[in-house]
Amino acid sequence: TPKRPTPPEIYMFALLDEDAKSIDPGPFERHWGIFNFDGSMKYPLNLGGGKSLVGAKGVKYLPKQWCVIQSQANVLDPSFAQSMSKACTYADCTSLAPGSSCSGLDTKGNASYAFNMYYQTFDQRKDACQFNGLSVVTNIDPSPSQSSCHFEIMIDIGKHENKSTSFAAPKIGLEYIMVMLVSSFTFTLFSFI
């Protein structure tokens, strides 16, 4: 602004969203990152000097399949609440919280979102889409149209692009950055103890 022509100092709280972080302060706690879980940009950010954030490149995803509630499943089934609890205990269901991107789903939509997050968290293993006969794997994206709610597909941590030549510096992968950040944090934490 004209009253503050020099860029302000900025504190970056998180590089990536953290889906395993405690939500005791609120569901927003897992979503402070300036990048999504896969390294894609949440929004454009000018870094000054004509430079902008750039999303991760070469990210490979698991196959395009989702775990959803079966169309004939009954939400009054005694195992329904238990299945939802299991899914949201081990996977990130914060997008279902009031005011969040998927808060407008109906009961079956909530179940499908929860079941899918669990399925994706466990790398689409066959046994990860077994919720007492209530769920099924589909190849049709269940993300509602005309909505910001997106049913995720997780990163395939076994497949990433690794193109480098002897004449150029190698690209640093997303997993390497995450390991370095955790290592730096751990070192800093132990330095203060």
Image (tube, helix red, strand yellow):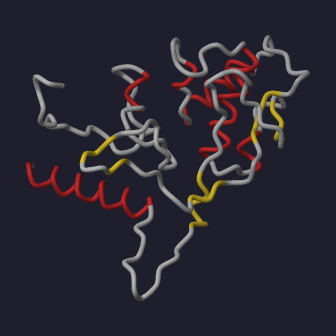
| Residue 176 picture location, percent across and down | 39, 64
- Is 6 above or below relative to 161? above
Name the side, left or right, on which 69 lies relative to 188. right
Q: Residue at x 40, y 44 (%)?
A: 16
In depth, the one of 125 and 103 nearer the eye is: 103
Task: Provide residue 192's location: percent of width, then percent of height.
Answer: 8, 49
Who's the residue at 52% across and 12% down the image?
98
Residue 27 falls in image quadrant = top left
Q: Quadrant of residue 13?
A: top left
Residue closest to the eye, 81 or 40: 40
Residue at 18% over, 58% down = 187
Q: Residue at x 56, y 36 (%)?
A: 91
Vertical side of 56 occupied by 163: above or below? below
Q: x and y percent of residue 153 in the render?
A: 65, 45
Residue 177, picture quadrant: bottom left
Residue extending farthest right: 72
Figure disc tally: 0
Point out the residue furthest to the front here. Answer: 2
- Left/right placement of residue 108 relative to residue 86 reads right
71 to the left or right of 10: right
Image x and y of residue 173, in percent: 44, 65
Nearer to us in this view, 15 or 121: 15
Quadrant of the image containing the N terminus:
top left
